Image (spheres, rainbow, N blue to C red):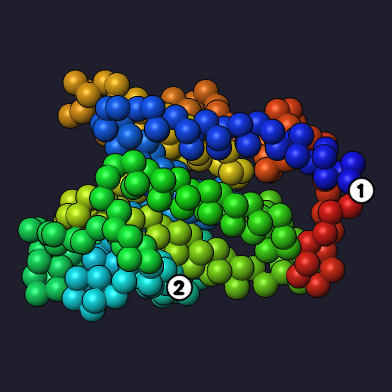
Amino acid sequence: MTRTIRRILANLPYIAIILVLAIVPLFISNLYYIQVMIFIGIYIILALSLNLLNGYVGLLSIGHAAFYGIGAYASAKLVKEAGLPFLLAMPAAGFIAGLFGYLIAKPTLRLSGIYMTLATLGFNMIFFLVLQNWMSFTNGPLGIMDIPPPAIFGYQIESRLQYYYLIFFLVLLTVGSMHRLMTCRFGRALVGIRENELAAEAMGVHTTRYKIQAFVLAAFYAGIAGSYYAHFVKYISPDSFYIYESFILLAMLAFGGQGNLIGPVVGAAILIIIPEIFRFLQEYRMLVYGSILVVMMLVRRQGLLGGREYSLKLTWFEEKEQSVYTRGDKFLPTE
């Protein structure tokens, strides 16, 4: 009982933040602010999904926007043409994106270093060209219009406030599921691969299998974000999933920090809010993101909150690092 109370007290900062984020939108009359919060939620999911690869496994992927676009187009086509309900189309879009993640990971993970990174970049560019030129399926540069809004158990989501609570739920689900993944043997195996792949492999960890699984999961989460985006804006085009989006996600990780669940959330929130404050610099947005990457690499390579391990029982100081040993492919903490 005492341990349960201590855990609740340790999680009070999270509980307070969740309650504030759940209540505050009820008192916001300006729909523009709610829309900005919705886009923050979308990019939080995308940044967390990329963090699974870049932060936890140590694989540098710069083509993540492709999986975002696959989820968006898949969900739009499934709902508009196949007549699938939103509650089935969203996870189906995630699975389709995950399938593409598997198809890309299987050959590219044989490469190493910059070659694997360039392969993900090439995939993003190929995906963009396919969207641009496959007129019969994607409608080319004109995109897909009149995407129906989400309908959940017969209840149609229409207002900005309703969209906000949907993305709020998806963000909570994403953070909770990733926390569970990273605190089980799967997550510890990924960290072991990141720290020393040769040592992890020598201790029985099937590194290629874990990398492919991480790639598929990252693509799945990106596909979920893409599905929500398509039904929120009700219009998608190839320009929304160009390589620029991948660099924006990289900037969010570089700014907020990677290798934990808090840094990508902070990075996504700040780098969505700042361009909205300085809208007169909208034409120079990519210059701003590039400058952030350069400055953070020079000043603090691990990002604002990088270099620390956070969990849902957060304490705002570095906890004693735990060493790990393996038994088979199961990483276990030692006292």
Report which residue position mark 1 lands on.
335
Vertical position of residue 200 compared to residue 31: above or below: below
Q: Is residue 11 left or right of residue 20?
A: right
| 3D distance between C-alphas at marks 1 and 2 | 36 Å
Q: Residues within 10 Å of mark 1 (few under 14, many from 20)?
A: few
From the viewer's side, name the closer residue of 139 and 199. 139
Q: Position of residue 106 (x, y in %)?
A: 47, 74
Residue 241 at x, y percent in the picture? 26, 53
Is disc 2 surrounded by few (<14), some (14 to 19) or many (20+) residues within 10 Å? many
Q: Looking at the image, can residue 85 be seen?
A: yes
What residue is pinned by disc 2? 102
Which quarter of the figure has residue 259?
top right
**Residue 230, image x, y percentages:** 26, 57
* Front residue (pair 149, 190): 149
The amino acid sitting under disc 1 is Glu
Instruction: Classify residue 280 as left or right of residue 119.
Output: left
Task: Relative to 1, say whether 282 is above or below.
Answer: above
Q: Secondary structure at mark 2?
A: helix
Secondary structure under tag 1 reads loop
Q: Residue at x 40, y 32 (%)?
A: 26
The tag earlier along the polypeptide, 1 or 2, is 2
Q: Is residue 126 something one can see in this rendering?
A: no
- In this view, the residue farthest toward the front is 154
Q: Residue at x 29, y 58 (%)?
A: 156
Name which residue lies at 18% across and 51% down: 239
Amino acid type at circle 2 is: Tyr
Residue 140 location (% of width, % of height): 10, 64
